[in-house]
Amino acid sequence: MSKLWGGRFTKPTNKLVEEYTSSIGFDQKLALQDIQGSMAHVDMLGSCDIITMEEVKQIKDGLLTIEEKVKSGEVTFSVEHEDIHMNIENLLIDEIGGVGGKLHTGRSRNDQVATDMHLYLREKTKGLIELLEAVQSSLVEQAETHVETILPGYTHLQRAQPVSFAHHLLAYFWMFERDKERLQDSLKRVNWSPLGAAALAGTPYPIDRQMTSDALGFDQPYPNSLDAVSDRDFILEFLSVSSILITHISRLSEELILWGSQEFQFIELDDAFCTGSSIMPQKKNPDVPELLRGKTGRIYGHLMGLLTLLKGLPLAYNKDMQEDKEGMFDTVETLEGALSLLAPMLTSMEVKGDQMKNAVKEDYSNATDIADYLTVKGLPFREAHEVIGKVVLYAIEHDKYLLDLTLEEYQEFSALFEGDIYEKLAPHQVVAARNSEGGTGFKQVFNQVALAKEHLS
């Protein structure tokens, strides 16, 4: 089968080379974007009198026919035609004859593939933003219900201070808000048009790059043709943002796994998001959050792979850059799957408020409040800290919690202790007292829920 570029060659491509260098196995995902870019390009060729309007009509009709066949699954792509661009062009020539060969006037596969990826990533980034907002909505929905549900807050995975469960969930809301903002901001770099840069140096044809840029909804054409065909920063940025996003998903997943364990019993995931064991009938495994956590490595890998690929490439296009697509496609699909599962899993999650409440009664996470109590009564905080350290040690040695100690026992450590100490140590009061801006106090958390809703709206 003759190649569209075969005039220079005296023998056919080795079949192993053909199979090894072909990208159609994965870049066929860009078929619709390739046609979209070609439609804009051929309109421009006609407008600039590079081809006739009759030829424009023939080519556009042919492209529309191919587009319908692609959408209906009628098209079989060929390894012999190497990539999606040559496959579409061959299909066009088969459909309308030799005039289809005029479509490639004034462009190259180098600017064509870059254009396709810009179009693809723009569409997918906008879709991921919508999915991310659905996850945020699920977090806000649970938070609004559980402002006054109290659980132990942790540092070093040791119980530290009691917090509102809503406050804990909303920490992830704000992580995802930053992820969303990064995705939105990345669209500024995605939305540049490489089309018309041709192979690397532009073209002698009197094309109108602004026209194709506008037709495809881009903000502007690349100012430099070398940069236009060799730039993959927009993919690097997407993979970098995605790596941060999947980190946040993984951290939340880890907490869901811990909270759902027999040791914590703070939540229970819906059966629809868990699986069982082939040998242990009592098991309910949190497979979905485990896989969300596990998928993190592959996205990190795609980022490192592309960074490594690009670090030594001279300008402009090199065949190495064929390796830029599979990691991008896989990252998009990984995140689409993760976010699509995360939102309903959070919504359907059962929160065991009583179990959380019992947990904060059986620890020493209110110890800081005793130090604050003594500080308010005039004892320097450092001295109060030492006093409370001794109180906690005494309680541990006597197998008691802080609310179990008698007033007489407290007064052995400081005469400043009075009967109101028990009110100060009650978990609900401990949380409510932290009313500083951004704190876990209930008033602040209600304000935070309202602010989160405002961001979503």
Image (cartoon, rainbow, N blue to C red):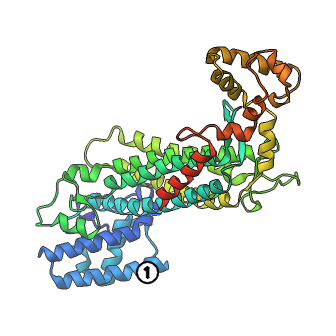
Quadrant of the image containing the N terminus: bottom left
Residue 13 x %, y %: 36, 59
In the foreground, 107 or 212:
212
At x 86%, y 25%, the residue is 406
Above or below, comparing residue 41 to residue 315 in the picture:
below
At a point 70% along the width and 61% down the height, the residue shown is 348
Residue 249 makes an appearance in the image: no
Q: Nearer the viewer, residue 144 or 444?
A: 444
Q: Quadrant of residue 144?
A: bottom right
Drawn side of residue 419 relative to residue 76, left or right: right
Which three-letter amino acid code belongs to the residue tagged 1?
Lys
Circle 1 SS class: helix
Give the image location of residue 311, x and y in percent: 35, 38
Residue in the foreground of this view, choosing between 285 and 409: 409
On the image, the x and y values in percent for residue 75 come to 45, 77
For the residue pair 16 and 406, the one nearer the viewer reads as: 406
Where is residue 289? Give x, y as percent.
Answer: 67, 51
- Left or right? Give the position of 134 relative to 304: right
Q: Residue 117 appears in which quarter of the rendering?
A: bottom left
Residue receiving disc 1:
69
Q: Please indicate, yes or no, whether residue 302 appears anywhere in the rendered image.
A: yes
The crowding category of the residue bearing disc 1, from other C-alpha atoms within 10 Å (few below 14, some 14 to 19, many at least 20), is: few
Identified at 69% across, 29% down, the residue is: 369
Q: Is residue 66 left or right of residue 315?
A: right
Residue 218, quarter of the rendered image: bottom left
Q: What residue do we see at 15% from left, 76% from top?
A: 47
Q: What is the total number of numbered labels drawn onto the structure image?
A: 1
